[in-house]
Image: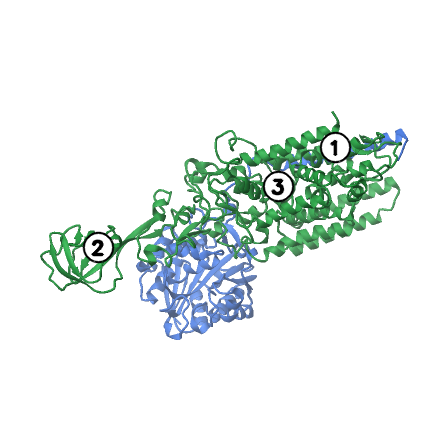
Amino acid sequence: MKIVTARRISQIFFFLLFLWFCIVSTLGEQWWQLRGWPVSWLMQLDPLVGLGTLLATGTLYAGLVWGLATVILTILLGRFFCGWICPFGALHQAVGWIANRGRKASAMIAANRYHRGQRIKYLILLFLLGAAAGDLLGRLLKAAMASAPLLAGIVVGMLLLGAAFARWQNKSGKRWAAAVVLIALGWSALGLLTEGSRLLAASLQTGLLDPIPLFYRSVNLTLLPLVDGRLVSLSPASRVYPGVFAMGAIFWAAVFLNLRIPRFYCRFVCPLGALFGLLGKNALWRVGQKADGCTACGACDRYCEGACEPSSVIRTPECVMCMNCLAHCRHDVMGYQRSLSAAGEVGVPDIARREFMVSLVSGVAVVPLARLAGMTGAAWNPAVIRPPGALPETAFLQRCIKCGQCMRVCPTNVIHPAGTQAGLEGIWTPMLNFRMGTSGCQQGCIACGNLCPTAAIRPISLDERLGRGDFASRGPIRIGTAFVDRGRCLPWAMDRPCIVCQENCPVSPKAIFTREVYQPVRLGGALVFQAMADNRLLVDGPALPSERFATGDYFVTIDGGDSRPPARIVAIGPGGITLADSPWAETAAAGDRLTLLVRLQRPFVDPAQCIGCGVCEHECPVKGRRAIRVTAENETRQARHRLLL
Amino acid sequence: MTADPALNRREFLARCTRAGLSAAAAAALGIGFYDAKGPDGVSDTGAALRIPDFSLAPLQGRICIARGTDRARAVGQAFAALGGMGAFVKPGERVLLKVNAAFASPPSLGATSHPDLVAAVVRLCRDAGASRVIVTDNPINDPASCFALTGIDAAARQAGAEVVLPRESLFAPYSVDGGRLIRDWPVLYTPLARVDRVIGMAPVKDHHRSGASMALKNWYGLLGGRRNIFHQDIHTIIQELAMMIRPTVVILDGIQTMMTNGPTGGSLSDLKPTGTLIVSTDPVAADAVGATLLGRTAADLAFIAKAQSIGAGTADYRSLDLQEIQT
């Protein structure tokens, strides 16, 4: 079998596997539903997810250790992931191949020529890693501040090491000594400057451009909801994801750019490819030319996916190991071999030190700048309701890669990608919107946290969610609190019976309770007692339509002094009003005033019981802006948002 | 480029070494930081901190009620009656004076500790040999404005104290032993950790929620965060504050009493001359005396009984070593 055939099989396999994972991320027990499928496995294989969270949190969470396998293989073999595994890369390669089939050899050679712009992906990577590294940097600076002997020890150690090396090499150690002292001084100065300041903060933004989360999110949130129909039947109600237009636009832009330049995204944008390019510097085997036989025919360049220029000095960090050069070389000059390319290699990316520093430093600097808005502190947005099990906001922002798995799996479709509600950093992070979807956040569901690849939403158990068993002392997880808007609520503002919210409140005892009141009904004129026979009441006054007032919610009472409870209207007909009993048959006289009353149950929320599930908000019949709405007040995850003692 | 097989082999071996080292480093990092469980749902980081007991055993149960109109004279003579400031503050000790600087209002309105009294107590401490006197509070209005407009800042500094404004970095999450409300809650810890003695100083004021704001309620100013959540259970939080901090001595200023519109006041008509200043090692007893100035009794104020029940003092001040003096 030719190597490119093997590569194609591998790409198709992983692409189909990816699609399969997207499809089966549907809550259910059918074989084509979630069950135990490792649907986030490709995200775990993606070492940028692991590296990003490691930088931001100092931990490598469970399955993300798979990324270590990818890293080690890349160190030994080169960027095999891009050419053989990455489903997004496979898509680009396929689209580029289809779109460029008819183009002339010279045009393709030109399109596949290395472009200086390809270094941008390394700068993107550095920027994103810099943004994730603020906390780590802070901890390192703090360690140096906390222990002067440690710092002094390191400095002395480095100086001794330098002195020994200088003596061995017979060189002057002056430059080394100066550098060590300068760095130590700079480090201390930075430590002093940043201590107690807000100059350093970490935010994980790699997911914006990391191809695996990007592809998951694009397919799950912008493609599957479109094709969901008779053939691909995934959810009973059509899925809604507000604000995904930009998400889809970026995806399609990336796809269509292949028409001009094949694998445009991989070459120019992909931070994961950039990471692999850096890791593969010392790969034991590499694509390159053998000693002689090259006729400079250009066949290799024509089919090169990475624009790494295999015909001349090959740029190894750009090589995606598509192996097309091997397959198309008629002279068997190209090989995947242990020795360096006979025509020479450029082993490192084409970035200047200045660009390197600017990208890294601006990445570190951009997060504190965004944090000035205070949205992780005093200016937190109560409209941002995070899924049950979500970490406190700053820790959450250090883990969420915006992959959209939680939004995809949510059975009720209430988890949506945020716009700027959670700040710039929070774009496309999950927030709950109870106005849409098929219900609120289901009490018995813990799917989102168990799918989250980075534990930004912790994998909680049902016991923890409901506050049972070992978690009984903590109580259930609250994601917010419902508030009644008395200006919009039917029984509160409009004298209409309702309490759908109370009926649907799923906790026991119910968080929504009611208080009963009788309110006079607004009529066109006075209601005057005429006579009462049996339980038939004859009145003078405005017409009382039966369909409105004989519903069982309306009552009549007589004005002045009568302590008897209001009498319920049973029916209204030509013979008068039928009441449930006949309270005033003896006592009332013609001409007495009557009052028509409506019995209302007005809803109240007990914040000690409310878990913020939003079922009430979802069911509220005031469909536009709901008359009962949940905000993140009293959410368990953030102690500062506590409402009650 | 190099056709020489020996050179090639050498290059390859060097590359193998570098690749091996990078792979090993990656593996070490990955495995070293591996976290199978993920983050936990709860954090109680404040359990390790302890606020020391600032009270002095031999001086337990001493209280002096001084009558007069001049705060400096009253407090001086009251301390003299209790054995002098030297009994409370030893030479070289560091003293924290927790004033009430809650509002950015002038001293004439009586909503905050009076600058004359602050200055007098700082001088007493300095004369007793205190190496440092720190004046602090976490007020409700903007801290810098509060300390400036109440006159406390100028008075304290002129008398030789340092004024510490509450910065975020001075707070630490704290849990009171046996407490229910103060769990992992930001407390103005750093100044407390740096002193040997703590003196509480508060005016007697009407307080709509708790009934009265006096010596015990004054410790509320050591809390940070969104502490107004505790108003849902004001008497218990005052009780827990009494558990949290055992002061060396408290000074309750009832030379004037804010009878109405407390705790902010805002008008001279809210104030009544009551001519009383209490210095006590028992804060509960001090508040029991203060209650009478407001025309209330200790029994009217639930927090007094609650503080007494956890051993912070006694409401029956007459059972103590009581001195009443006219100044």
Dot 2 falls on a residue whose secondary structure is: strand
Q: Residue at x 46, y 64 (%)?
A: B100
Chain A: what color?
green
| Chain coloured blue in this rendering | B
Q: Which kind of residue does numbered mark 2 sit on?
A: Phe
Tell if the residue under mark 3 belongs to the same chain as the one under mark 1: yes
Q: Chain of mark 3?
A: A
Dot 3 falls on a residue whose secondary structure is: helix
Between label 2 and label 1, give the one nearer the viewer.
2
Dot 1 falls on a residue whose secondary structure is: helix
Tell me if A624 is positioned left or right of A543 in this view.
right
Q: Which kind of residue does numbered mark 3 sit on?
A: Phe
Tell which circle, 2 or 1, labels the residue nearer the N-terminal end: 1
Residue at label 1?
Answer: A77
Relative vertical location of residue A15 with respect to residue A395 in this rendering, above or below: above
**Closer to the camera in the image, A593 or B318:** A593
Quadrant the C terminus of chain B occupies: bottom left
**Closer to the camera in the image, B234 or A254:** A254
Q: Residues within 10 Å of mark 2 (few under 14, many from 20)?
A: many
How far, Cα to Cα, is label 3 from label 1?
Answer: 25 Å
Residue A33 image offset from top left, x and y in percent: 51, 32
